Image (cartoon, rainbow, N blue to C red):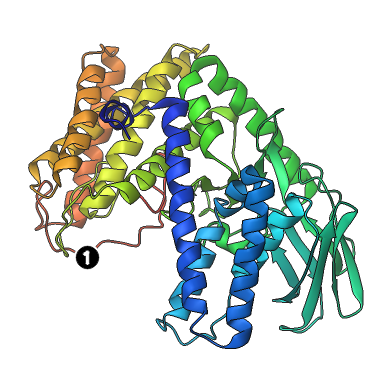
Amino acid sequence: MSGALFDRIASGEGGREAAVLLRRAEYSRRLMLVREVVARARDHSAPVAAAALTAWSLLSRVHGTAPDVAREVLTYPSVGPAQLRSLSVLVGATDAVPCADPLLATAVAGALRANLPVTVTLPVRRGRVLLPSLGAALFDGVPDGEPATVRGGPGGASVTAAGRRVRVPPDTGRPGPDPVSGTGWLGLRPLLTAPGRTPLLLDDIDPDAFPGAPGTGRLPAAQWAHWRRTFADARRLLRAAHPGPLAETEATFRAVVPVLAPPGRDAAGSSDETFGCTGLSTPRDARDLALALVHELQHNKLAAVTHLFDLTAERPGEYFYAPWREDPRPLGGLLHGVYAHLGVALFWHRQSGAERTADGWRLAWVEFARWRDASREACGTLLASGRLAPVGARFAMGMADALDELGARSVPPVAAARAAALSRAHRGRWAARHSGGSSRAGHPSAPAPSASPDSSGGTRRS
């Protein structure tokens, strides 16, 4: 990564060039992870080693025939957590039975997408055979471990278990209706499609796409239609007022996982190991969705950057005041929050010129001032912490410079006053809850669970 591109990313932007580079870096990281899984599997029983070697051979064939397919399958968000879990078991970190089935399922998905001849046996798990980035063959009532045969090639693909055969549709963009019985194909459904682009998928099937989140399970067709409409509206909004973030989101996101939110709240989040994915509760409207995508885009970008560079030198037990959270945050979480809310402030500044109602205009300016000033304050905390590595200090200075530029933008006085009042109220609540701790320096208070939504829709990271 060039210094100039690093600095552009630090400024809150980066464009499509940054998104493409970070995706390539994540692909390299996944390749190293897969190689390690295969290497460790060789030390285990013959079936485990054979499954891993078959997967590696199949992935090599996919890469040789359709390298873009290999890259898309291996960088699919759920593949990272699945392979990390496999590796953890293979190295003896847990008591689970070692296996390489998740890697073999990934390789099979790649072969089917590349139209390669393949015949592979996978076990049924929880009544299904899951193929990452494609979907799952359902076999209700079939016990765990029952062998299922996956066959594919130019003539089509199928999965057969316990005498039941399930056809795999050839086009992931047209998954077909959900099965009405306990046997059939449950395909991933597209949210956004465009000629020449990988579709953005709604993944309400694969638990590894956003592990640990309270997922909704399979959404009914009417709810999927609502998601599709709202995503199309959000893309139009981004195209009109936020072309830079639109280019980044289109080059970054591959899947969206629908998650449950507390009553009356929204939820959104990202995970270090699922680059290209975000978990979202049901979107209310295009503007809220566009904002959530921009917010989670920042988390995705920064997670990928932290896989390339050590930005912080944290001390265990140190937590800091974050103007968007009710709980103290570790330094890495504060860094993520500043970067995400820099993106939020940039969003609202652009959006202020696109609003067509007085209420929308006022909201945009209040939100801009609120998150610009909050991010400047928290960025100052980062820089004063003494816990940033040199490259992390450069990144924080890039954020600070961008926030200083935003600080020069005049805000309508009423909006500025409202934003300041919201900031004071938040600090007052925080101080009452965490009395005895400094709001600027690190302190050893225990943080609340990080999955609670913050005021701008982010979870887990800010």
Residue 121 picture location, percent across and down:
75, 75
Q: Residues within 10 Å of mark 1 (few under 14, many from 20)?
A: some
Q: Is residue 211 above or below residue 373?
A: below
> Camera-side residue: 33 or 411?
33
Asked which quadrant contains residue 378, the reply is top left
Q: Is residue 240 above or below residue 94?
A: above
**Identity of the residue drawn at 24% across and 45% down:** 322
> Camera-side residue: 37 or 369?
37
What's under tag 1, amino acid-wise? Ala
Seen in the image, is 321 located left or right of residue 16? left
> Camera-side residue: 349 or 272?
272
Residue 89 picture location, percent across and down:
47, 79
Whether residue 154 is visible: yes
Seen in the image, is 380 located left or right of residue 358? left
Position of the N terminus by quadrant: top left
Seen in the image, is 93 located left or right of residue 355? left
Residue 26 picture location, percent across and down:
45, 48
Q: Is residue 141 above or below residue 242?
A: below
Seen in the image, is 458 located left or right of residue 280? left
Whether residue 216 is visible: no
Residue 252 picture location, percent across and down:
51, 38
- In this figure, which residue is indicated by the disc labeled 1? 446
**Identity of the residue drawn at 17% across and 31% down:** 397
Asked which quadrant contains residue 408, the reply is top left
Judged from the image, the secondary structure of the residue bearing numbered disc 1 is loop
